[in-house]
Amino acid sequence: MQKNKALKIVNLILAFLFVGIAISGIFQDFIPYETFRTFHPLTGYALVITVAVHIFLNFNWIKVNYLKRKK
């Protein structure tokens, strides 16, 4: 799979996970506790893993823009 296509998919997944975590956190008083207790941590772990993949796919860009060597 090409890197740009993978990044588009990862970015979409990141957006859905972020929205899911935000909604479950904001409305935690209105959803059953067992549902919150299951959904919120699982989406949090998935978000962390997806962020790691996102950073891995963008590492060359990060090196060029932020990890420059000073001459």
Image (cartoon, rainbow, N blue to C red):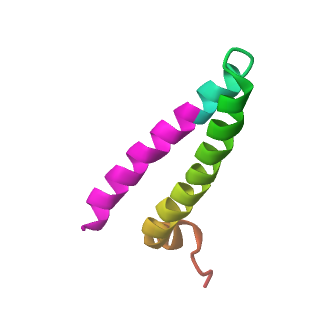
Q: Is residue 36 above or below residue 31?
A: below
Instruction: Left or right? Give the position of 19 relative to 35.
Output: left
Image location (x, y in percent) of residue 54: 48, 60
The residue under the point 41% across, 48% down is: 11
The residue under the point 46% across, 37% down is: 16
Task: Indicate the quadrant where residue 2 lies.
Answer: bottom left
Task: Indicate the quadrant where residue 67 lies.
Answer: bottom right
Quadrant containing the C terminus in the rendered view: bottom right
Q: Nearer the viewer, residue 26 or 33?
A: 33
The residue under the point 57% across, 50% down is: 47
The residue under the point 75% across, 17% down is: 29
Which residues lie in the magenta part?
Answer: 1-20
Quadrant containing the N terminus in the rendered view: bottom left
Image location (x, y in percent) of residue 7: 36, 57
Q: Nearer the viewer, residue 28 or 6?
A: 28
The reply to whether the magenta stretch includes residue 15 is: yes
Q: Is residue 1 above or below residue 12?
A: below
Q: Is residue 52 above or below residue 18?
A: below
Instruction: Left or right? Give the position of 38 relative to 29.
Output: left
